[in-house]
Image: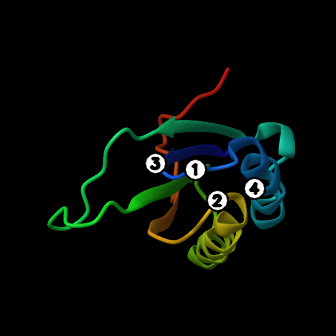
Amino acid sequence: MPQITVDYSAPLDRRGFALALHPLVVEATGASSAACATRFREVEETVIGDGATDEAVVHVEIALKFGRTDDTKNRLSKAVLALLPRHLKTADGVRLSVEVRDLESSYRAG
């Protein structure tokens, strides 16, 4: 079950992004769309560098069951990074990042 977490401080079309993201995850990993779970956490404050700018951030973390190759994870992270700007009101002054990682062996879902 892909566990997806999005931390954001920029205006983001959350539902639209999730509905576009899930097919990318399915295509890259072979997971089912019904298994994709995305949760959003709004970040109230971010400080970048010396704090001289008011940049916003969007960070997407996708945690997958162990077994996907580094190439698969790299391709997925690039695809997600390309998708993000289409769901922001503006990408100006927004730092975007994506991490695709393995779930811990202790992960269980019920």
Q: Nearer the viewer, residue 71 or 56?
A: 56
As measured in the structure, the alpha-carbon distance from the residue carrying label 3 to the one carrying label 1 is 7 Å
Amino acid at circle 1:
Pro
Amino acid at circle 3:
Ser
Height in image: 26 above or below 50?
above
The quarter of the picture where residue 79 lies is: bottom right
State yes or no: discs 4 and 2 in contact (Cβ < 8 Å).
no
Horizontally, residue 3 falls left or right of residue 95, namely: right
State yes or no: discs 1 and 2 in contact (Cβ < 8 Å).
yes
Q: Residue at x 41, y 41 (%)?
A: 43
As measured in the structure, the alpha-carbon distance from the residue carrying label 3 to the one carrying label 2 is 11 Å
Amino acid at circle 4:
Leu
Q: What residue does disc 2 label? A: 88
Q: What residue does disc 4 label? A: 21
Q: Residue at x 37, y 63 (%)?
A: 55
Residue 50: percent from left, percent from top: 14, 66
Q: Residue at x 59, y 76 (%)?
A: 74
Q: Nearer the viewer, residue 3 or 52?
A: 52
Q: Residue at x 75, y 56 (%)?
A: 21
Q: What residue does disc 3 label? A: 9
Amino acid at circle 2:
Leu
Height in image: 96 above or below 40?
below
**Marks 3, 4: nearer the viewer:** 3
Q: Could you tell me which secondary element the residue under label 1 belongs to?
A: loop
As measured in the structure, the alpha-carbon distance from the residue carrying label 4 to the one carrying label 1 is 17 Å
